[in-house]
Image (cartoon, rainbow, N blue to C red):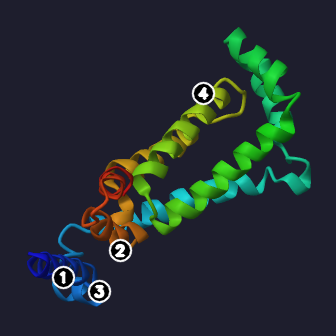
Amino acid sequence: MEEGTRDADALTQRNVDESVTLSLRDLLRKKQVFRTGTGFFLVLARLVGGYNWFWGWTGKTPWTGWGWLPSYLQKEAMYTPFPQYRAFIQNSMLPNIDQFGWVQFIIEITLSVTITAGFFTGLFGLIAIIWAATIVFGAFPVPGENLYNLLNFLILPIVVWGTRAGRFLGIDAYIRPRLLASKSGMLRWLGKIAT
């Protein structure tokens, strides 16, 4: 019985290995990439989305005293139509700008790296949607902000999350089959949800 189980495990592992060894050259030769062009669009969406998050955190770093973040939060508090949000900014965020700054710095650096690399795009795409929605919510009433730019900032994470863009030329394409073939229920669940 043990030998049969070992043979089945070896066969499963071989199938997983064969499924992830499909190279870009194989994809191009089979013309699967060019049928719809969506694969390259998804890579482009990931790169642009990752760049947006990269650009976002570089202006608010700890070594610059959080850059423009404190003054922008003051603008948000000044122009928001929601008194509870104004109170939250003035009473929680601004007095604790170091803690809040570190949170936003770590989240935005993580989003820029994971989205660009196509790593756990299901999980980090959802986090990016939530983070972008909070930014859009706060920035919308500030004079000089362009609604279309803000909505574009929100649309890219939706595309990355909704299409699981990391499954094409991303780390997800490599790890997803291995996670789904895992004996651990937690890893299989992670493969389904996060990639």
Give the side of residue 63 with respect to residue 111, left or right. Answer: right
Quadrant containing the N terminus in the rendered view: bottom left
- From the image, state whether disc 2 or disc 4 is nearer to you: 2
Q: Which mark is residue 137?
A: 4
Looking at the rendered structure, the secondary structure element under dot 2 is: helix
Quadrant containing the C terminus in the rendered view: bottom left
Please, what is the three-letter code of the amino acid marked with disc 2? Tyr
- From the image, state whether disc 3 or disc 2 is nearer to you: 2
Among numbered discs 2 and 4, the one appearing first in the sequence: 4
For marks 2 and 4, give the CA distance. 36 Å
- From the image, state whether disc 4 or disc 1 is nearer to you: 1
- From the image, state whether disc 1 or disc 3 is nearer to you: 1
Among numbered discs 4 and 3, the one appearing first in the sequence: 3
Answer above or below: position of 167 versus 30: above
Question: Dot 2: within a 10 Å radius of its alpha carbon, few (fewer than 14), some, or many (20 or more) residues?
Answer: many
For marks 4 and 3, give the CA distance. 42 Å
Among numbered discs 1 and 2, the one appearing first in the sequence: 1
Q: Residue 109: x percent and y percent? A: 66, 57
Which residue is denoted by mark 1 in the rendering? 10
Which residue is denoted by mark 3 in the rendering? 23
Which residue is denoted by mark 2 in the rendering? 174
Looking at the rendered structure, the secondary structure element under dot 4 is: helix
For marks 1 and 2, give the CA distance. 19 Å
Q: Residue at x 30, y 68 (%)?
A: 39
Q: Residue 76: x percent and y percent? A: 75, 26
Among numbered discs 1 and 3, the one appearing first in the sequence: 1
Res. 72 image quadrant: top right
